[in-house]
Amino acid sequence: MTRPHPESDPRLIADNLEDGQGEEDTSSPERLCAVTRERLPKAAMLRFVLSPDGIVTPDIAERLPGRGVWVKAERGVVETAARKGAFARGFKSQVTVPDDLAGFVERLLLKRTVELLGLARKAGQAICGFDQVRDALKEGAPAFLLEASDGAEDGRSKVYFLAKALYSGVKVAGALSAPELGMAFGRDRVIHGLVRRGAIAENWELAYRRLTGFREAPELTWFKDTDR
């Protein structure tokens, strides 16, 4: 699976530190991964809690009560945690791990990504449509260009190179399909979109980066040769 480049990824990996079982230390802005033993910023991690009946439950919004166990936000790491007993060690009790926990996490992350994008749309901070994106680019630098993973190469190249001619450091998000983008905008399908800069965009980016730990981020290769 393709990973985001570190220099463009706000999750920013920290150094490996002491041993532990992945339990929470609320005095620190970082958390210890129950699998990799890395101490990482919370933005690069996923929190899990136990339901009252002992089922391992993803806490995507980090609001559920109880003790938390943290795992690096990558599919392979979550799969290893489920397979190797990391949750039982972290919670220090017997637990039930749902089947295909990583797939469940991906669906939850997708839901949060779409919901935040919908919130941005309602606040006037996200738009869709080729012409609308083209006009918005003339008004200011975007936080993100949105391009459907199943969209045509010609269309996304036109949008990208227009943005690149105006601004440096243009970010593109391409991990969502046209129907998935459409859910955020109340349409059947969306191919091109734009997120304006602001607090919502920052929250959306963190959700999107976590999602790309569970699915391919095709934007990393779309313009690779042409950006040299």
Image: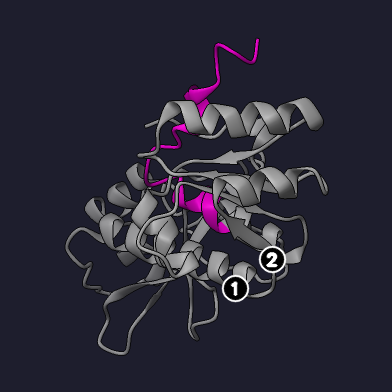
Q: Which mark is residue 42?
A: none
Which amino acid, mark 1? Leu
Q: Which quadrant is the N terminus positioned in? A: top left
- Of the numbered discs 1 and 2, the one sitting upstream in the chain is 1
Please state the horizontal and vertical placement of residue 117, each as a whole percent of the image: 56, 64
Q: Are marks 1 and 2 in contact (CB under 8 Å)?
A: yes
The magenta-colored residue range is 207-228
On whether residue 227 falls in the magenta region, the answer is yes
Which residue is pictured at 78% across the width and 61% down the height? 198
Q: Is residue 85 visible?
A: no
Which residue is pictured at 59% across the width and 39% down the height? 172
What residue does disc 2 label?
200
Please state the horizontal and vertical placement of residue 213, each as a whole percent of the image: 44, 45
On whether residue 180 falls in the magenta region, the answer is no
Q: Residue furthest front?
A: 131
Q: Which quadrant is the C terminus positioned in? A: top right
How packed is label 2: few (under 14 Cα within 10 Å), some, or many (20 or more)? some
What residue does disc 1 label?
119
Looking at the picture, does residue 65 appear above or below residue 210?
A: below
